[in-house]
Amino acid sequence: MQTVYKKLLSLILLLAGFFPSVWACSGQFSILYPGSTIAQDYTNGNATGNATYCPDGTGNATFTLTEAGNTASGTLEIRSIATNSLIRTISTQPGQSYTFTLPVESAGATRFRFFHSISCSNNKLATIDVDLTPTLNLTAALQSGAPVTSTVCPGTSVTLTATGAPANTTYTFRDAAGVRIDANTTGTLTVVARNSTYYTVETNIPTCGSGNVTQRINIATPVSISSSDADNYITSGQSVTLTAQGSTSGQYVWTETANGITTTLGAAGNQIIVNPTTQTTYTAAAVNSALTCNSANTTLYIGTPNPLPVELISFTAEWQAEQPRILWATASERNNSHFVVERSLNGTTFTAINKQLGQGTTSARTYYSFTDTELGRSKAGVLYYRLVQHDASGETYTSPVKVLKGTGKEIRVEAYPNPFQQAIRVVVTAPTAGPATFEMLDGTGRLVFQKKLTLAGGTQEISLPEVARLPRGLYFLRVVQATSEQIIQLNHR
């Protein structure tokens, strides 16, 4: 019997020599998670992997997979836990390391499921559920407070909120070009989305070392336009390629507006080449689109951008008792003529309400303030403020928009049918009874129709047969009652 056992052992060892991949196939591997310095070891079965990382502003997180203890090839399949969609597949070889990046959310945990397999005679499989949480979070919300979960219409005010840094730490916000647009300790910034873009915020997180960390958030519009020129400042007659995205049909109606005159360029595909000789705004409207907002625009400027003459270090709007109070400060000023405070009831149309002289040229810090006595907290719905700085040469700079929410109720407006061919019916919910103004603006903002009516408090339906005679195109219906205002987009076909 011992002889039989010895022969069997010899046979096993012989087979192991001929088929090493069968016997040396443990399924062992390791993953180095973002923000970690020590890799986590895994073999077979189910496991979890959690990591808190310091974002770098790219919208991605970096991992490293290392195969160990295997002599056979393998596969790493990565899926989203939320949607079960396949993100990527990586083919692996024994003893090799693979570094890869995955897209991550700008706030909260991003959840992945890793499936790791080794091709053995008895295949090895490990399933790992991974939660990644950033140290710096950045969220976006509409003025109603609802989170932005998909696209927003061009011209929509969006409030960005950053969290994660200790109290009184400064958050610095930048646009997609890297230009600083605000810096504050509240971690909030209201922006107006014109096209699909992204914003970043940077601050110091003590657990991330001495340097700043940066978080990125994308804001998408259904239709967007990109330009072949990086900053849209060009020489007269320079050729620029404009590319539109978002139309399900792939077709757009292009228009151009220069010197107050709008010209229709006609229906075309998603790309046009233009050669403006003066400042021109180009608009692309999606053809046969079911989108609620189907157009976007971009402006080409002639000349070169000049450095800003004023270093604005703060701009805030807050309630002081019953009145809105606007405060701003400059670190330095160069040839600064004056500031104009502008107010809007809808976040789109602004009116100048105050002018204050600047300091000319100074390197000293200067503080400014203005109290808006025309509106009270109890009467106002949502108020929007921005600051326009004018230098001595006539150049202007417009600040980000600040938002104040009052306790007054807002007017709500819906219109149908949309698109329309004949009359439209407007369903209005008025917070109080009183006079209201109905205005129709064309795609350039020009007033083409106005009607004044007295509304009852509550919900009512108003017919506007007069708009049927307007030319086909894109329009905006604006309804104003007291300090409340709403604008909706309509298409006339």
Image (spheres, rainbow, N blue to C red):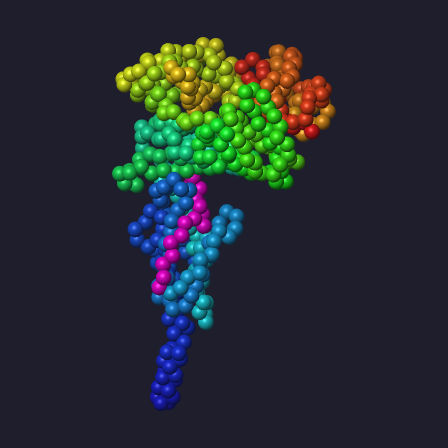
| Residue at 46% from the left image edge and 26% from the top image edge | 302
Residue 104 in the magenta stretch? The answer is: yes
Q: Residue lying at the far front in this picture: please name it.
A: 237
* Residue 208 visible in the current orientation: yes
Quadrant (top left/top right/bottom left/bottom right) for the N terminus: bottom left
| Residue at 36% from the left image edge and 27% from the top image edge | 183
Taking 66 as reference, is 313 above or below it?
Answer: above
Can you tell which quarter of the image residue 75 is in?
Answer: bottom left
| Residue at 40% from the left image edge and 72% from the top image edge | 21
Q: Residue lying at the far top in this picture: please name it.
A: 373
Q: How many labels, in total?
A: 0
Residue 456 placement (x, y as % from top left): 65, 14
Toward the viewer: 227 or 174?
227
Taking 110 as reference, is 490 above or below it?
Answer: above
Toward the viewer: 238 or 429?
238
Toward the viewer: 325 or 269?
269
Can you tell which quarter of the image residue 206 is in?
Answer: top left
* Residue 127 visible in the current orientation: no
Quadrant (top left/top right/bottom left/bottom right) for the C terminus: top right
Residue 258 in the magenta stretch? The answer is: no
Q: Which residues are magenta?
A: 95-112
Taking 71 as reference, is 173 above or below it?
Answer: above
Q: Is residue 23 left or right of residue 79?
A: left
Residue 433 placement (x, y as % from top left): 62, 13
Toward the viewer: 156 or 322?
156
| Residue at 43% from the left image edge and 24% from the top image edge | 400
Residue 110 placement (x, y as % from top left): 44, 45
Taking 101 as reference, is 257 above or below it?
Answer: above
Residue 228 placement (x, y as % from top left): 48, 37
